[in-house]
C-alpha cells in the first residue's frame, strides 16, 4: 500500500494554519462576533402562517415598516416563523409585527412574544464562556495524564487552533453566533481531541516497535495506518451535517456550519498540525522511555 508523505508537506500545512489563525484573530479584533439574542437580549415573536411564506418577503416587509436588526427563520414547520428583534420589549410588539406583515395580505396568527433581557444575555455569555474554559481545562488535565508532556502541549495547541479558526470564520463572515453555535464548538472540541488521541496512540506505539530514529517516517506510518478510519469517520459525519445544513431549517443552520467547519479543521489538524508539532518540539525515542530510579544505597564494605 502506498504511503503518503504527510510530514514532507508539513511546512505547507503550517503556512495554511498560520494564515487561517492570523485571519481569525484579525476578524475577531476588527469585527467581533455577531452575537445572537441569546447573548445580547431582545424580543422573540413566534408567528403561525396559514401557508408557508418566503422568508425574504417577511424580512422585506419588516424592513419597510422600520424594524431593524431583524432575524427571521422557520421554527419547526415551514409555516411557523420565528422573528427575533434586537429592540426593547413592549406589550404591543407582537401585534405590531403581525400588523406589519399583514400588509402583505397573508393570514397570520400571533403565537407568542417574549423578551430576553440584556442581563440574561450577559449571564448566558459569561456562563457559556466559562463552560468552554472548563471544557478546555478538563481536556488539558486528561491529556496531561494520558501522554508525555510534549504530546499534551501539541494536542492542546492543535485543539486551540481548531476552535480559533471556527470562531474566527464566524466573526469574518458575521454569521450569527448563538448558543447552538457554542454547542457545536463544544462538540468540535471532543471530536478533534478524539481524532488526535487516536493518531498519537499509534505514533507512540510505532515509536516503541520501530528501530528507526527518523520521527518523520514513523509519524507518516502512524498517520497512514489511521487515515482510513479518520476519513471514514469524518466523511460519514459530514454527510449527516450537510443533510442538516440543507434540510434542517434555519434554526440549526449556523449550528451545522460550526460543526462542518470544525470537522474539516479537526481532521486537518489531526493529520498535519498535531503530528507535525511533535517534530517542532523535537520528540525523541528517549522521551517515551521511563526514567529508572537510581539505587542510592551504598554497599557495605
Image: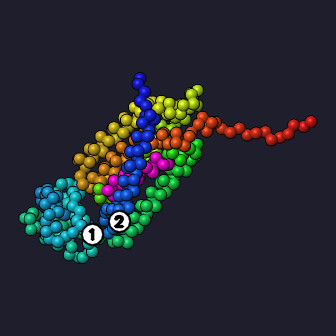
* Residue 164 x, y percent position in the rendering: 41, 53
Pointer 1 residue: 86
Let me know if residue 170 is in the magenta part: yes
Task: Point out the residue furthest to the left here.
Answer: 105
Magenta stretch, residue numbers: 156-172
Instruction: Check the image and report above or below for 176 versus 236.
Output: below
Relative vertical location of residue 234 with respect to residue 165 in this rendering, above or below: above
Label 1 vs label 2: CA separation?
11 Å
Q: In the figure, residue 120 lies in which quadrant? A: bottom left
For residue 112, say whether it is visible. Answer: no
Residue 167 position in % (x across, y down): 37, 55
Instruction: Determine crowd level at label 1: few under 14, some 14-19, many 20+ residues with C-alpha closer than 10 A.
Output: some
Q: Is residue 111 left or right of residue 118?
A: left
| Badge 2 element | helix
**Vertical placement of residue 114 versus 250, above or below:** below
Crowding at dot 2, Cα within 10 Å, few <14 / some 14-19 / many 20+, comes out as many
Please name the residue shown 41% across and 33% down the image: 227
Q: Report the front residue among 38 and 203.
A: 203
- Which mark sits nearer the N-terminus, 1 or 2? 2
> Quadrant location of the C terminus?
top right
Label placed on residue 13:
none
**Residue occupied by mark 2:** 39
| Residue 261 in picture, x, y percent from top left | 34, 47
**Which residue shows up at 40% across the image and 51% down it?**
21
Amino acid at each position: 500500500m502506498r504511503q503518503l508523505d504527510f510530514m514532507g508537506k508539513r511546512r505547507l500545512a503550517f503556512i495554511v494554519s498560520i494564515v487561517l489563525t492570523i485571519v481569525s484573530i484579525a476578524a475577531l479584533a476588527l469585527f467581533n462576533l455577531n452575537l445572537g439574542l441569546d447573548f445580547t437580549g431582545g424580543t422573540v415573536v413566534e408567528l403561525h402562517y396559514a401557508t408557508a411564506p418566503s422568508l425574504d418577503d417577511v424580512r422585506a416587509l419588516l424592513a419597510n415598516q422600520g424594524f431593524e436588526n431583524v432575524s427571521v427563520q422557520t421554527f419547526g414547520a415551514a409555516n411557523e416563523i420565528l422573528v427575533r428583534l434586537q429592540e426593547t420589549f413592549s406589550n404591543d410588539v407582537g401585534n405590531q409585527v403581525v400588523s406589519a406583515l399583514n400588509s402583505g395580505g397573508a393570514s397570520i396568527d400571533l403565537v407568542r412574544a417574549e423578551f430576553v433581557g440584556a442581563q440574561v444575555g450577559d449571564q448566558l455569555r459569561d456562563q457559556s464562556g466559562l463552560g468552554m474554559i472548563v471544557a478546555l481545562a478538563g481536556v488539558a488535565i486528561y491529556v496531561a495524564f494520558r501522554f508525555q508532556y510534549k504530546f499534551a502541549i501539541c494536542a492542546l495547541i492543535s485543539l486551540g487552533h481548531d476552535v480559533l479558526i471556527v470562531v474566527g470564520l464566524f466573526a469574518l463572515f458575521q454569521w450569527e453566533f448563538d448558543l447552538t453555535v457554542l454547542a457545536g464548538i463544544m462538540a468540535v472540541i471532543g471530536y478533534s481531541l478524539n481524532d488526535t488521541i487516536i493518531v498519537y496512540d499509534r505514533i507512540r506505539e510505532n515509536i516503541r516497535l520501530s528501530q528507526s530514529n527518523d520521527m518523520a517516517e514513523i509519524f507518516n506510518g502512524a498517520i497512514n495506518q489511521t487515515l482510513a478510519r479518520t476519513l471514514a469517520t469524518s466523511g460519514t459525519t459530514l454527510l449527516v451535517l450537510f443533510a442538516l445544513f440543507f434540510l434542517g431549517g434555519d434554526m440549526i443552520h449556523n449550528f451545522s456550519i460550526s460543526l462542518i467547519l470544525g470537522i474539516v479543521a479537526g481532521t486537518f489538524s489531526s493529520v498535519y498540525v498535531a503530528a507535525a508539532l511533535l517534530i517542532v518540539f523535537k520528540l525523541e525515542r528517549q522521551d517515551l522511555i521511563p526514567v529508572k530510579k537510581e539505587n542510592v544505597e551504598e554497599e557495605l564494605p
